[in-house]
Image (cartoon, rainbow, N blue to C red):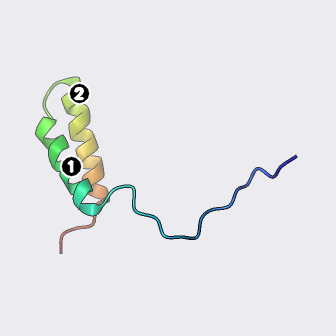
Amino acid sequence: MDSPTGSYPTTPRLPLITLDEARDAVRLLRHFADDSPEGQQAGAWAADLALRLPADG
């Protein structure tokens, strides 16, 4: 039976999303936030993502 563990590449990888892209995503989510169920989800997700981003400094 093969081992369930794998090997991970040692070469550098690009981030899944850049900081600028993350900030744009938060801005767009805030744009779509409203009182609809989808808008409330957009607002909640924007708030959650914004808390994870480094502060501008």
21 left or right of 4 in image: left
Residue 45 locus on image (x, y percent): 28, 42
- Residue 42 vs 54, above or below: the answer is above
Q: Earlier in the sequence, mark 2 or mark 1?
A: 1
- Check disc 1 and report the residue beneath it: 26
13 left or right of 57 in image: right
Q: Residue furthest bottom?
A: 57
- Check disc 2 and report the residue beneath it: 38
Q: Nearer the viewer, residue 18 or 44?
A: 18
Residue 38 locus on image (x, y percent): 23, 27
| Proximity of marks 2 and 1: CB atoms separated by less than 8 Å | no
* Label 1 neighbour load within 10 Å: few <14, some 14-19, many 20+: many
Q: Which mark is residue 12?
A: none
Quarter holding residue 57:
bottom left
Q: Residue furthest right?
A: 1
Q: Residue at position x 59%, y 65% from top?
A: 9
Q: Which amino acid type corresponds to the residue marked 2 in the rendered image?
A: Glu
Q: Which amino acid type corresponds to the residue marked 1 in the rendered image?
A: Val
Residue 28 locus on image (x, y percent): 16, 44
Q: Residue at position x 19%, y 41% from top?
A: 29
Callout 1: SS:
helix
* Label 2 neighbour load within 10 Å: few <14, some 14-19, many 20+: few
Q: Residue at position x 22%, y 67% from top?
A: 55
Residue 18 locus on image (x, y percent): 30, 60
- Residue 26 vs 19, above or below: the answer is above
- Count of numbered marks: 2
